[in-house]
Each structure stands twice: as structure tokens, then as C-alpha cells.
Image: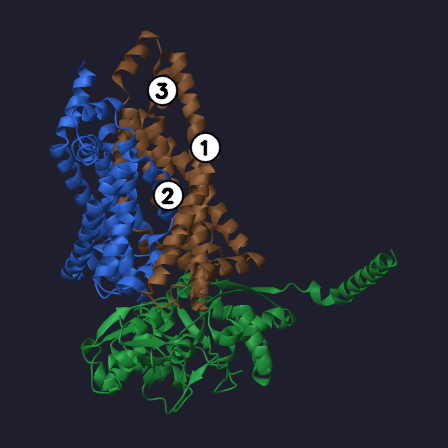
Amino acid sequence: MSTLKLTRRRLGASVTAAVLAAILALPAQAEELKKVRFAYLLSDTLLSVFRAKDQGYFAAAGLDVDLIPVQGGPAVIAALASGEADIGYAAPVPPLNARAQGVPVKLFLTLGHEADPDRKYVWLVASKASGVSSLADVKGKKIAINGNGTGCELAWRDHLAAAGLSYDDAEVVVLPFPQQEAALEQGTIDVGCAIQPFYASISANPEIGAKVIARGLLADEKEPVISDSVIGTDAWLSENEDTAKAFAHAVVKARDELLANRALVEEAAVTYLDLTPELAKTLDYSVLKPEVDVKPGEVQRILDALVKAGILKTPLKAADVSIDLKL
Amino acid sequence: MKRLFLHPAAVLLAALLAWQIVALVKTTPLFPGPLDVAGALWDDGPRLIREIGHTLRRAVAGFALAALTMIPLGLAMGRIRALGFVGEPLVAMLATLPPPATVPVVMLFAGTGDLAKILVIAYAAAIPLVINAAEAARNLHPMLGLVGRSLGLTRLETLRLIALPSALPMLAVAARMAASAALLVSITSEMLLSTNGIGNYLQREQENFRLDAGLAGIVLISVVGLILNRLIAASERRWLGWHYQSRTAETQA
Amino acid sequence: MTALLRPVLALGLLAALWQAVVWAAVVPERYFPPIATVVQAGMSMIARGQMQQALFDTGSRAILGAIAVNLIGIGLGLAATGAPSLRRILDTVAAILQPVPPAAVVPMAVFALGLGWKLYAFVVVLVTIWPPYLATVSALAATNPVLLSVGRMAGFGPVAMLWHIRLPAAMPEILAGVRYATTIALIAVIVSEMITGRDGIGFLLFQKAFAIRIPEVFALMFAVGLLGSAMGLAVSAVYRGFAGWHLAQRGRAA
């Protein structure tokens, strides 16, 4: 009986405290939070965004961010174009492709970069049984991409061109990331294109005997290259530059905390990506550059590579496809 | 006047006109009008024909595989009670699995080549065939069963000589459903693991935001589906003419 | 009672077949896990409340969609039977739209309809409306002439004829269309969720595959089968209800 009373008293106290807190917080709440609908493709670099929302950093910056998961970069663009979302997150290739087709979207933030020699997060990985040990061996072999017009297609085209081969020299199979490990092990493909956490799983599989034949979105990454993008429509960006900046600051705050504490990263990977704790241990969460604003030179490198690979038919200027927020 | 106004062709034309007007007002590449689609159809014509060839080849193979295995199985399920008792709920359970979700499983056993796709297509086409075959065989007129017995037919002969012909009208309905399912899934499977076919074309163009080309592909699919439907209806009239004749005779009586 | 026994038996058979394939070791266990592992994965999803939530989201979409679309389809079938010019138009539309796969339309439909309920409604209507419509039209056109003359002798007008004779006689065929439509409504919902969903079984199938949780992917597929069976049983119950009505109508007409 006494314990019950105690809990009741404690409950009463916490309710009072909550009410008090609410009253104290009232002046801040009186300002309406600005609604931002964020359509995203699930990725480990987004842990900072999830954390910023759950820790209330967006709210503190006056933003009410609504997270909308979609499957695939083109779907992110579709969500923006249909007015279903204000901003979105995808690999850089889909929005640049969309821009080339006249869809009015621009890159305004990037959460990750790639650079030589080992900050590279796309792996072209062969099975031991395939006998492939370098790009030159790919001729006539079965290679996988996760979809047409994706980062994988760009990576294959760029690396093969650098090795003096053409994309058409190999037999390309479209195979979603989750199916590639089994296909490699069973020999239905010779070389896969993997990102995390699939690469970790493939390289840990003794039956495959993984051999990395190339790494990175582009073969030449002496200068950093953006590996993802936060995008908005031209109309939204022209009216909401301050909102975009507030969003960026909140994300950077959460990201700095994650970078400082490995345990937080693994916890977040389990919570938000649904990874098993073991798989979360293999996650490489590190950034090349602390800044998140998009620099024209970094965008231009991808644009030029897309044109060279034949994915983009006409050259584009970085200034037309991205905004440097100069945070 | 009213006749002309309500003619399907007139309605179709009006719909196309309305679509073109909306497209002209919207002026975005994400809402192409019928003229854009026609343009894409013209530009990509030869490629589209080649791709749909791959799609149809696999659809036909999958359909044939399903028909050859599932019609006998369905008839047996309808005639042999124990088989039907467990078989039917099993089929009902498998029928609700979306074919795209089965692709990864099939891939484990059949790789990523033509065989995998043909198996997924056969799976989709099998469902209406096996269900209708079982239903038709079960609802076989009791008199026909007795005829079989008095003729001293074995179980297998009863299936082949009595159950199969009397199930044909219902199988025709199932075949039509199975054929459209085969085409549908042939395209879907190409969107998930493929190097060619109209599904691969659609996916490629959509991911490159060429919506006019995507719609051109869909128009082609519609036309092919329409032709396929007509072909099946014609062969039905030809092969099942006796059934409809007896029905008309009944009506006239 | 046997109505429930049979799916359970079928599920057991499926599990046994599954396990036999595992034992045959054609495929590494990692990709095709033993049935016990799949059950365990399903249980852990139930414990986390994930499974129930997904079943509820997908199930409610599919059930609401199936009910609405079946009613619309039958309604259109009735209207088309009354108005031949409407029937010609609808038949043309059906012939044009029927072969189009939802997976091909969804990515483009998103541009026009967004990601919300409008998209689901569009996809479900697009693929599900034709079976009940076509079944209704063809069944009403094929009423046994003997029954029609009975109706005429009883002095029935067109409405009474439809209600007391043609509709009851057409019911079995219409319900076969309804049953098929209900199955594909579930498939259409899951496919939409796989492509653009934010919750539901289709989305979870995608998310689990990307987290390399293979046993949970299979547990979800079994759950889809069970959900489909449950919906099938519901349609059968409706069917039995109508069959009773059918007999009663026949009795009254005779």
C-alpha cells in the first residue's frame, strides 16, 4: 500500500514538474515551428538527421522535421516534384539526372565525401570463384548494379573506362543490394557493387573469398567528391534559405556528437537502421570534411564524370544544379 | 448524334485531348502529354519492339510451363479429395504472395538468368489455372462421373477423357487470367533482375526521368495486352465453339 | 471448424516442405534459413510489436481497398448491364488498362499523386477493379433463360427481375471475381508499399532486406500468406451468406 502511495506521490510530483516545464517553455512554443518534410533513402550517413530529430535539435532551431522514408533515389525526386516533400536525401546521381531532364531541383547540402586512398564507400567486389582479380578481368563477366542511373552504374562506367575497358564489355545484371551476396556466393554473378552494410557482410563471408577490384564512386578521387546530397526544389530553396541553414546547423550538431562517441553511432545504427549489434560494429561512420555545404568544384567533378560516362547527355554547370549556402 | 458522342473511340479521343491540354498547361517534363509520348514511341520504336520480344518470349515460356503442370495438378486436386483438402488452402496461401517478393527466393534456386524469370512468371500464371481446374473438376456433373465408371474407365482415364473436356470452359477463363498475369509478371520481374525486356526499359527510362518514354512503354504494353486478349478470345471461340453453341441452343429452346 | 483446420494443415505442409529444402542443402542456410529460425524471427518481431503493426497497416489498407473496389466494380457492372454504351466504353478502358503492371505505373504515378493514400487508392483501383466488373457483366448477361421465362411469367419488371432472378443467379460468378480481386488487392498494396511505402509489410520487407535480416524477411512472407488466407476465409464466409440468400431468393421466385 505504501509503495503505491509513494508512486502516486512521485507521479504527482512529475506531473507538476511537467506542467511547470511546459509553462516555462511556453514563450518558445508560442512561435510556430516551421514544418519541413524530408523524404529520404535510408543510409548510414543519415544517422545525424535521425539523431537531430530525436534529440530535439530541429525543434530548438524552430523546425518541425517530418521524416518520410522512400525506396530509391528517383522516388525521392518524385516526392519533391509532386509537392509531397520539401527537401530530400539521395545519392548525387539521381538529382543531377533529374536536373538534366528539366526537373527543377538543386543540391544544397552534402553529408558525406569520398577521397583517395581509402575514404571510398562503394566497393566493386569479386568472388574468388569468378577468377576476377582486377578490372581488366571483367571483360565478358557478369557484373551487378543495384539499378540503372545509380551510383553503382557511374562507378562501373568510370572505373572500367579508367582501366581501358567499356561498360558494354561486361554483362550487366540489375540486382538489388540485398541479393548480391547470395548471388556472389552461388556464382550467379562474378562481381558485385556493394555499399555498407552489405560490403561488411560480403567481405566477412569465407565462402565468397571477396576480392575488391575497385573502390569509390570515381576512379580518380585525388580531390574530394560528394557521395550524397540533400536536395530541394528551386521554388522551396529560393524562399527558405534560412530554414535550409537552420536544418544544416542542427544536423551538424548531431553529427559532431556521433563522431565524438563511437557507442552512440552503434546505438543509432541499431535503432534507426535496424542493424543487428554485430553488424553495427562494422559500420564506418567517419567524415572527410566537417562542412556540409556543397562546393561547386566538388559537384562539377561528378557532373563531368557523368558526362564522360555517357549517363548525362549534355554538360551541366555546378552553379545550375547546386547552391553553396556558405555556412 | 448521341451514339457518336458515346462511341468508345470518341471518348478515348476526348480523354487524350483533355490530357494534352493539361500537359500544355503544366509545362513540366514530369507531366508529358500524348504528343510527347507519341514522339518517344516513334524515337524508341525499334528498341521497344526488340525489348517486348524478350518480354513475350519469357511470358510464353512461363505460361506454357504453368499450363502443362498446373492444369493436371488442379484437375487431380478437384477429383481426389485428400489432395484437394490440403492442396487448396496451400494454393490460397501461396496466391497472396506478391510475385516481386518471391523473386529473391527464386533467385537462390535458379540464378538471375531467364530460368529465374520464367519460374516467377509460371508461379503467377499457375494460381488461376490450378484454382479453376480444381473448381471445374470438383463441380463435374455427377452423371459424368457415373458414365465414366459404367464405361470402366480408370481414374487417370476419367481425368483425361471426362474431367478435362468438361473443365475446358472454366479453364479458358483461367487461361485468360493466367495469360495477363504472365505478361504482367514478365514485366515486373524484368524490373527487378534483368538486362533486357520492356520492364528493364521502363525502369531505365523512369530512373532517368524520361517519363514520356516510360509512358510510351506502357502504351506498347497495353497494345500488346489487347492483341493477346483478342487472340485468346478468338482461339476460345474456335476451340470451345461447341460449348457456346450448346449454350445458345439452350437459350433458343 | 474444418474451415480453420485446412489452412493450419496447409501451413504445416508448407513448413515441412520448407524444412525439407533446407535439409537438402541446395542453398546455403544463411540465405534459406531453417523453419525454426524463421519462426523465431517472427516471434521476435511480434515481441517488438513490429509484426502486428505491419499486419494492421497493410491489412486495413487491403481490406478497405478490397471492399471499396469490389463495390465499385459490381456497381459499374450493374450500370454497364443497364447501359450498353457505358459498357462499350468501360470494356475499352478495361482492355487498355488491364495489362499494365502496377510496378511499372507506381514510380510515375508518384509524380502526379504523391506518396499518400491517393497513391494506394490509385494502384488498388487500377489493378483490382476489373475482376468484379468483368464477372458481374458476364454473369448478368448469362442468366439461364429458363429462369428468365419464370420471371416473366411471374410478371416481374426489369428491377424485380434483376433483384430476384438475375443477381442471385449471377452471385457465384461475381463472388469468384470478388475473391480474386481481394487477393490481388493485397498484392497491390504490398507492391505499392515496397516501392514507395513508409510503413506496412511491403516497406518492412524492404527495410529488413537492407538490414540483412533474412529470417525476418521470410517471417514476413509467411505472415502475408496468413493474412491472405484470413482474407480468403472472410470472402468465403460472405459467399456462404450470399449462397443462403441465393437459395432463399430462388425459393421465393419459384
Q: Is residue C80 above or below residue C61?
A: above
Q: In which quadrant will I find the N terminus of chain B?
A: top left
Corner quadrant of residue C128: top left
> Would you call the spot at circle 2 few (<14 residues within 10 Å), some (14-19), or many (20 or more)?
many
- Residue A48 at x, y = what percent? 55, 75
- Badge 3 and badge 2 in a common chain: no
Q: Residues within 10 Å of mark 3 (few under 14, many from 20)?
A: some
Q: Nearer the viewer, mark 3 or mark 2?
A: 2
Q: Which residue is mark 2?
A: B92
Give the Cα separation between the discs numbered 3 and 2.
32 Å
Circle 3 chain: C
Label 1 SS: helix
Q: In this rendered view, identify the residue nearer to me: B46 or A36.
A: B46
Q: Where's residue C106, x and y in %?
A: 36, 55
Which amino acid is tagged 2?
Answer: Ala
Q: Is residue C160 left or right of residue A173?
A: right
Instruction: Assign the C terminus of chain B to one quadrant of the image.
Output: top left
